[in-house]
Image (tube, grey):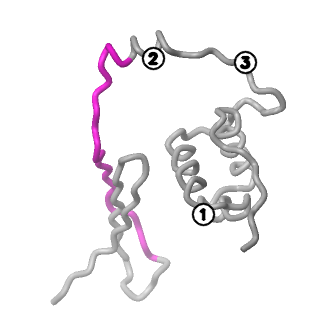
C-alpha cells in the first residue's frame, strides 16, 4: 500500500517551511487539517560585532519620506518576499492581493511599507 502525505513547502528569505496535512475523511477535501509545521533556515550567518560597528560608522541618516504613511505592515519577512516578487515581475495591486490572500487594505500597507523604505516604486506596466 502506497501512503501519500500532503505537504506544502514554502521558501522565503532563506527559510524553508513545511506544512504537513491530513484528511480526516479521505473522500472530503474540506476535511483537511494541519498536522505539523516546521521551518528551516538554509543560509545562516551570525552577525558579528564588527558588522554592527561598520553599519554605525557608515550609516547615512535621511529625512522621513513625505506623503508616504508610516508602515503598518506587520510581517517584515512578507515585505521582503513581496519585494523579491516585484523584482522578478510586475504585479498589480489586485495580483498582490490575490497572491497573498490579503484584504486589499493589507496590500496597501505592504506597498506603502516598501515605498517608505525606498524599496518599491510605482511604475506603469509596459505593454508587449
Quadrant housing the C terminus: bottom right
**Element at label 1:** helix
Residue placed under numbered mark 2 in the picture = 55
Cα distance between the residues tagged 3 and 2: 18 Å
Which residue is situated farthest in the front direction here? Answer: 128
Cα distance between the residues tagged 3 and 1: 33 Å
Q: Are marks 2 and 1 in contact (CB under 8 Å)?
A: no
Residue placed under numbered mark 1 in the picture = 99
Q: Are marks 3 and 1 in contact (CB under 8 Å)?
A: no
Which residue is situated farthest in the right direction here? Answer: 67
Please tell me which residue is depicted at 28% across the width and 47% down the height of the picture.
42
Look at the image and give the residue range highlighted in magenta: 31-51
Residue placed under numbered mark 3 in the picture = 63
Q: Taking 24 as reference, is 55 above or below it?
A: above
Q: Earlier in the sequence, mark 2 or mark 1?
A: 2
Cα distance between the residues tagged 2 and 1: 34 Å
Q: Earlier in the sequence, mark 3 or mark 1?
A: 3
Amino acid at each position: 500500500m502506497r501512503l501519500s502525505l500532503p505537504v506544502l513547502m514554502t521558501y522565503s528569505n532563506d527559510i524553508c517551511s513545511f506544512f504537513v496535512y491530513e484528511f480526516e475523511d479521505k473522500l472530503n477535501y474540506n476535511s483537511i487539517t494541519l498536522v505539523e509545521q516546521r521551518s528551516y533556515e538554509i543560509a545562516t550567518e551570525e552577525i558579528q560585532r564588527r558588522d554592527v560597528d561598520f553599519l554605525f560608522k557608515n550609516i547615512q541618516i535621511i529625512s522621513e519620506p513625505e506623503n508616504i504613511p508610516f508602515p503598518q505592515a506587520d510581517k517584515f519577512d512578507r515585505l521582503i518576499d513581496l519585494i523579491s516578487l516585484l523584482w522578478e515581475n510586475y504585479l498589480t495591486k489586485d495580483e498582490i492581493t490575490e497572491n497573498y490572500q490579503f484584504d486589499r487594505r493589507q496590500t496597501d500597507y505592504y506597498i506603502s511599507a516598501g515605498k517608505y523604505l525606498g524599496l518599491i516604486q510605482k511604475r506603469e506596466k509596459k505593454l508587449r
